[in-house]
Image: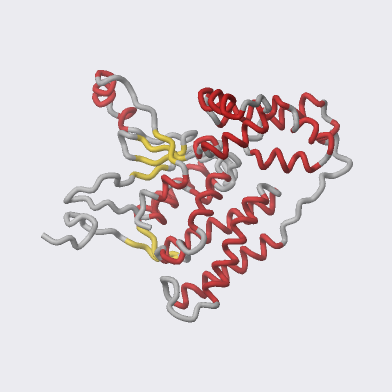
Amino acid sequence: MPFISKDWRSPGEAWVKTQEGWEKKKVLEKMIKQREESSETGEDSDTENTSQPHCRITIKCTREIAGFNGLDEAVKKLDFRSAVKDVRRFNYICALLDLLVGQQMTALSGCAQKVLLAMLEEVANYATANQHNPRGLRRLIAKLRALSAAERNACWGGPLGSQLLWHQHAIKIDKILSLAGGMQICEPNPEMKPQFLQLPEECIREVILRLSDHRDLTASAQACEEIAVVVNEQRVWRELTNYHFTQQQIETMKLKKDTNDWKELFHNLKKNYGISEDRQYAEMLSLCRYCCCLFWRSLGHPCIADQCPEFRARIQEAGGLVPPSPIPPSAFLKFFSL
């Protein structure tokens, strides 16, 4: 029997037309339910949602279930637009957008393109309003400008979608570029006390020690001489090296390069092993091996192991619960037909 859909036994999907286009009814109902639960608990859009956004995905293909997951549906179910406003998830969302914006975006479905640009607008709004992560925003804007120029100067062929769709995209892109163009890093109010440099050196050092990106350390050192003195301390680079690399990797590199300079060791290790994606983000998506659900680790998800005592008992007999697998942005995109 030939396939005529992703599941030949499926009764089909119900769709509802919204201002942003056609949406699956069950996805729309879930989004409305999340908003209602948030309003009932008295939370606003900037606070953490307690409704446990999650998305079940198809990992293995069978004759009855084709291995297809919708990117736009997953992004909505996982509430990425609200996640942009969480400082722990902001860098993860930016990294995901960085992989999608560009030539790959032109091959996405119209719904996925709309969702992607909506997320970009949220990123631009949040970054400009809070002066947060200008480097990540600039990288995304550079790719978006290149995409816009390529689409407008195309002579033969064009991206997927109608001319009307891409006209709407062009308006959205111009709005995002305008937002990013108006971003200015303002100095704090001089009357605000205490200023950062007025803090004790121990406090400044504790702040510097919590930076996990070596580029942030370099940029901090360029800000002023006082911070540069702290950044150049061996302890700072030792902690950064121990955070990103294993003890075996460090000892091997020490013997290979015959050096005890931690800054030099870090850059040699980075060149040789690279930086693991698991260590670049304060929070990532996780995959439950029992439910095949993607979810944010801090919010959790309704797991079958928690809801079914018999299933949990069988898991305990088999050796105990298996922790969820972290899913970096590159691994997340592999679940979809891009």
Q: How is the image coloured?
A: secondary structure
Residue 203, image x, y percentages: 76, 26
**What residue sits 78% from the left and 43% below the top?**
222
How many dots with numbers? 0
**Whether residue 44 is situated above or below residue 23 in the rendered picture:** above
Q: Quadrant of the N terminus?
A: bottom left
In the displayed image of the protein, which residue is found farthest to the left? 1
Q: Nearer the viewer, residue 223 or 57?
A: 223
**What residue sits 75% from the left and 32% below the top?**
232
**What residue sits 66% from the left and 33% below the top?**
264
Left or right of 192 in this view: 59: left
Q: Nearer the viewer, residue 259 or 151?
A: 259
In the displayed image of the protein, which residue is found farthest to the bottom? 155
**Whether residue 173 is situated above or below residue 72 in the rendered picture:** below
**What residue sits 55% from the left and 42% below the top?**
89
Residue 260, image x, y percentages: 66, 24
Residue 86, image x, y percentages: 58, 42
Residue 244, image x, y percentages: 56, 31
Name which quarter of the figure residue 309 lies in. top left
Left or right of 322 in this view: 172: right
Q: Nearer the viewer, residue 101 or 7?
A: 101
**Whether residue 246 is situated above or below residue 70 in the rendered picture:** above
Q: Quadrant of the C terminus?
A: bottom left
